[in-house]
Amino acid sequence: MSVKRDDKRDQILKAASQCFSRFGFEKTTLQDIGAAARFNKASLYYYFKNKEDLFIQVVMLEAEHYLNALQEQVKPLDRAADKIVAYLTGRLAYYRQVLNLHQLSIESLQRFEPMFDDVYQAVREQELAFLSQLLREGVEDREFLKLNGERAADALLTVADGIKHEAVQRSRTAFAQEVDYAPVQEKLQYTLTLLLNGLRK
């Protein structure tokens, strides 16, 4: 029985994820991924442009799964503000986990960022919808003042991403996993609390 094209792509992504986690992005080769997926190196180009494209697809797939799980995790919290803070700080924890897992250099991370922006849009739209819903819940429960949920969600996500990127830009280390994220987490939590307090009734 032949393997469907989508199944083959998934097989490659799974193998790539394992290789990147084991060897790190820098040391992983397409030959490693091909061997792990039981494909020859040349056939990988039918599905992905290059190693960078493959890496981005792996990270985005992982991100989608993680963020969906995180959304479910924060839903049982009582207050909308707590859900929002837990979600956005959880995103930062995931970002740090990705950097640690794939052993990215700062140089590679900065090179990837414009490429990530292109494929991140679909995930970001889903995140905005989730945050907008939480903000609307806060308004309905009289926790927040009346507001435009979509615009407020976009502002919160932009602030969270800005704080995250600032830490990498200011880092003097060679590898992204060496960035100290403890003060970043604290700064993000403080900033979000400050902003959300401004929305309270």
Image: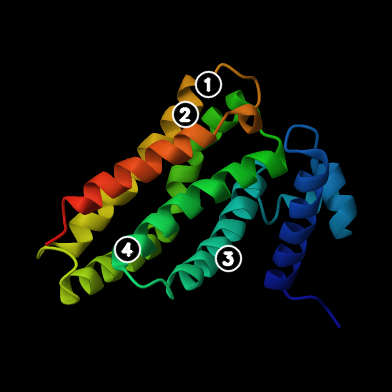
At horizontal 65% and vertical 26% (from top left) the residue drawn is 175
Asked if the residues shown at circle 1 and circle 4 are in contact, with their CB atoms under 8 angstroms apart, the answer is no
Q: Nearer the viewer, mark 3 or mark 2?
A: 2
Q: Earlier in the sequence, mark 3 or mark 2?
A: 3
| Mark 4 residue element | helix
Q: In the rendered structure, are the residues bearing label 1 and label 3 in contact, judged by CB atoms less than 8 Å apart?
A: no
Numbered disc total: 4
The one of 140 and 125 positioned closer to us in this rendering: 140
Q: Residue at x 58, y 65 (%)?
A: 65
Q: Residues within 10 Å of mark 2 (few under 14, many from 20)?
A: some
Marks 1 & 2, CB-CB < 8 Å contact: yes
Res 127 quadrant in image? bottom left
The residue at the point 26 percent across, 57 percent down is: 153
Residue 10 is labelled as none
Query: Which residue is label 4 attached to?
Result: 131
| Closer to us: 121 or 86 | 86
Q: What is the distance, in whole Å, between disc 1 and disc 4 at their CAs?
A: 29 Å
Q: Amino acid at mark 1?
A: Ser
Rendered position, 78 above or below 111: below
Q: What residue is shown with label 2?
A: 167
